[in-house]
Image (cartoon, rainbow, N blue to C red):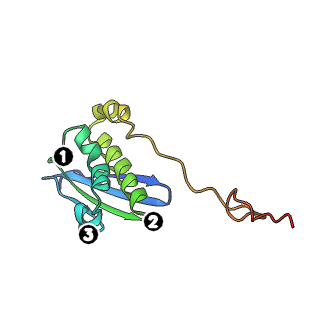
């Protein structure tokens, strides 16, 4: 069996496990084609971005398991996972991917709710009278 590369991508609450092997360019997310899983074009572009950057869209089959978060967080988690898997296959691709900002884990997530507040920073409505 040929070498399969694994990588994990995270964003907000979403975690994407990426399994990449040589193939014909099929991308499967949770058992569905990625274009069916992400009907919005800009999310499909997020998923394809690392492959387009290194011009290898047709050279890998990718199977992805993703859970948690919303569609945008999941798409961005997949983007990071694919970029990391590409680096495992060929270390020379790393500078190209890094220059495009694809190797950076976006650490922004929801701030926790504080006591005495309605949300993280939003106070309850103040009534003077």
Image position of 28 (left or right of 123): left
* Disc 1 + disc 3, Cβ < 8 Å: no
- Residue occupying image coordinates x 33% and y 36%: 97
Q: Earlier in the sequence, mark 2 or mark 1?
A: 1
Q: Earlier in the sequence, mark 2 or mark 3?
A: 3
- Residue occupying image coordinates x 45% and y 60%: 14
- Residue occupying image coordinates x 16% and y 53%: 25
**Furthest residue toward bottom:** 31
In the figure, 53 relative to 31: above or below? above
Q: Secondary structure at mark 3?
A: loop
Is the N terminus in the top left, top right, bottom left or bottom right quadrant?
A: bottom left
Q: Which mark is residue 57?
A: 1
Q: Position of residue 7 (x, y in %)?
A: 36, 51
Quadrant of the image occupied by residue 39: bottom left
Image position of 3 (left or right of 58): right
Q: Which mark is residue 31?
A: 3
Residue at image mark 2: 68
Q: Position of residue 119 (x, y in %)?
A: 67, 62
Q: Residues within 10 Å of mark 3 (few under 14, many from 20)?
A: few
Q: How many marks?
A: 3
């Amino acid at each position: 069996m040929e070498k399969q590369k694994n990588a994990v991508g995270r964003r907000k609450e979403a975690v994407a496990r990426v399994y990449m092997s040589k193939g014909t360019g099929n991308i499967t997310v949770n058992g569905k084609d990625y274009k069916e899983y992400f009907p919005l074009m800009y999310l499909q572009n997020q998923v394809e971005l690392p492959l387009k950057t290194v011009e290898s869209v047709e050279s890998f089959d990718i199977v992805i398991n993703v859970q948690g978060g919303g569609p945008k967080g999941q798409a961005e988690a997949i983007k990071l996972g694919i970029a990391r898997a590409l680096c495992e296959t060929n270390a020379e691709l790393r500078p190209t991917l890094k220059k495009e900002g694809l190797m950076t884990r976006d650490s922004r997530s929801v701030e926790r709710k504080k006591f005495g507040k309605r949300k993280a920073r939003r106070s309850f409505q103040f009534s003077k009278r």
